[in-house]
Image (cartoon, grey):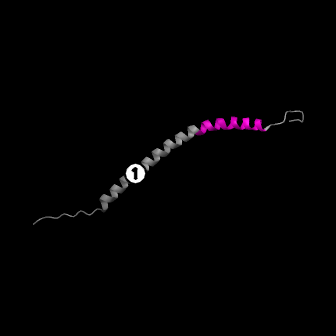
Amino acid sequence: MTHDDKRISPEDIRNKLNEITGSVGDEFETTKSTAVTVGAIVIGVVIVSVFLLGRRRGKRLATIVEIRRV
């Protein structure tokens, strides 16, 4: 820029920043929804696997006592 050119005003900076963050904001929303979906699926898989492993361990460690009448 030369001295004869127009000076950069705070409004110019705000406009440019809004232009840049606007495009990034759209990508962020798309990525955010995908991340939430993947996170929910991962949490679901972890809960189901912990449940199944706990059931298996419970069966293995359970004592079966039979009482018979004579």
Percent position of residue 4, x then y: 89, 33
The image position of residue 55, as x and y in percent, is 33, 55
Disc 1 packing (10 Å; few <14; some 14–19; many ≥20): few
Quadrant containing the N terminus is top right
Task: Check if residue 17 falls in the magenta segment.
Answer: yes
**Residue at the image position 41 percent from the left and 51 percent from the top:** 47
- Kindly state the secondary structure of the residue where label 1 is placed: helix
Q: Nearer the viewer, residue 1 or 8?
A: 8
Q: Which residue is mark 1?
A: 49
Q: Amino acid at mark 1?
A: Ser
Residue 19 in the image: x percent, y percent? 69, 34
Q: Quadrant of the C terminus?
A: bottom left
As drawn, the residue found furthest toward the bottom would be 70
- Residue 44 in the image: above or below residue 19: below
Left or right, 26 with respect to 17, comes to left
* Extreme residue in the left direction: 70
Q: Residue at x 67, y 38 (%)?
A: 21
Q: Which residues are magenta?
A: 10-28
Which of 28 and 66 lies nearest the eye of the viewer? 28
Dividing the picture into quarters, in which one does residue 56 lie? bottom left
Measured from the top left, where is residue 20 in percent x and y?
69, 37
In which quadrant of the rendered view does residue 25 lie?
top right
Q: Residue furthest right?
A: 3
- Report the magenta stretch's main SS: helix
On screen, residue 25 above or below 63: above
Instruction: Determine if the magenta segment contains residue 16.
Output: yes
Q: Residue at x 56, y 37 (%)?
A: 30
Q: Is residue 54 left or right of residue 68?
A: right
Q: How many marks?
A: 1
The structure residue drawn at horizontal position 53% and vertical position 43%, both measured from the top left corner, is 35
